[in-house]
Amino acid sequence: MRHQVISFANQKGGVGKTTTCINLAGALCEKGTTILLVDMDYQSNLTLGVGIFPDEVKKGMGDVMLFGDVSLREIIHTTNIPGADIAPANLDLSKVDINIADRKERQSILHNKLLEVKDNYDYVFIDCPPAFNLLTINALSASDGVLIPIQCYPYSLSGLNTLLEIIDDIRYAYNFDLEIAGIIPTAYDTNTKIASEVLKELHERYGGKVFDSIIKKSVKVAEGPIHQRPMVQYAKSHPVTMAYRELASEFLKREKAA
Ligand SMILES: Nc1ncnc2c1ncn2[C@@H]1O[C@H](COP(=O)(O)OP(=O)(O)OP(=O)(O)O)[C@@H](O)[C@H]1O
Ligand SMILES: [Mg+2]
């Protein structure tokens, strides 16, 4: 296994980070994989998406990041996904950036907190916010790999080079183990020419980093937050669910090939 801790990152908002994290986790857990989900976004969409209401989170990632005496172990909940636990978030996570900015070890808080729990799971999936803030830096500093969801729309590729440069910067500054685990095309609209052009360009620029599995655009995907569970549970045989299962198989294959 090449990457045990994986961040879902892209500074662009609404590109499918959280949706990919939940549905890939759902499809992997269906195959017997165990995963710790970590919500590093104060929007708390990952937390909500696996069955926990952020308002009901008493201690969450905000406390873990702010207070030395709060461990990850004590905030971990079970989820609606058998095989996946979550370190949930609520709005308190929004206080972290400003409060840790002056700390000497501000970029390695999550890395250090993960040490005592990560080996209890096959993978740790970290959902990043749509920003290059200290939460994202903590996530990337704690990760072995980054998965980058890309929606196949015009301008989707414009920020990708910047993201890859920042990942390089973090690799050299804090975490030499950090690799690109893959780029995942999502929300692919078969009815538009532009989507196929964007996909072609993605392959030309980034080659083998791009997953062959493609997640098509579907309203069924957007229903996720209502069901608070992954598609493998609420739309068992939908074509996009099958695509998430293929993505999970490809992910495991890529992870096996060191
Ligand atoms: N394949 C898809 N088909 C249709 N809608 C999708 C698809 N994937 C994601 N969406 C929808 O796109 C929106 C953004 O997705 P998501 O919340 O996963 O993005 P994000 O990158 O996590 O956003 P943020 O940057 O705000 O955290 C959501 O409403 C989601 O339901
Ligand atoms: Mg999100």
Image: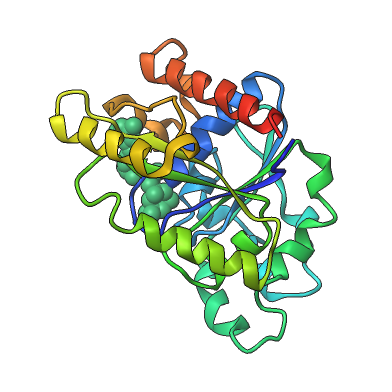
Residue 247 percent across, percent down from the top left: 51, 25
Residue 66 percent across, percent down from the top left: 67, 75
Left or right: 14, with 176 as reference point:
left
Question: What colour scheme was applied to this rendering of the protein?
Answer: rainbow
* Residue 53 visible, this orientation: yes
Residue 169 falls in image quadrant: bottom right
Residue under the point 37% across and 28% down: 215
* Residue 16 visible, this orientation: no
Residue under the point 42% across and 66% down: 131
> 186 above or below 56?
above
Residue under the point 28% across and 56% down: 158
Q: How many marks?
A: 0
Q: Nearer the viewer, residue 234 or 187?
A: 187
Q: Residue furthest bottom?
A: 102
Q: Nearer the viewer, residue 164 or 92?
A: 164
Residue 35 falls in image quadrant: top right
Q: Nearer the viewer, residue 96 or 251?
A: 251
Left or right: 6, with 166 as reference point:
right
Residue 191 percent across, percent down from the top left: 15, 24
| Quarter of the image with the C terminus in it | top right
Q: Nearer the viewer, residue 133 or 76?
A: 133
| Quarter of the image with the N terminus in it | top right
Residue under the point 66% across and 54% down: 143
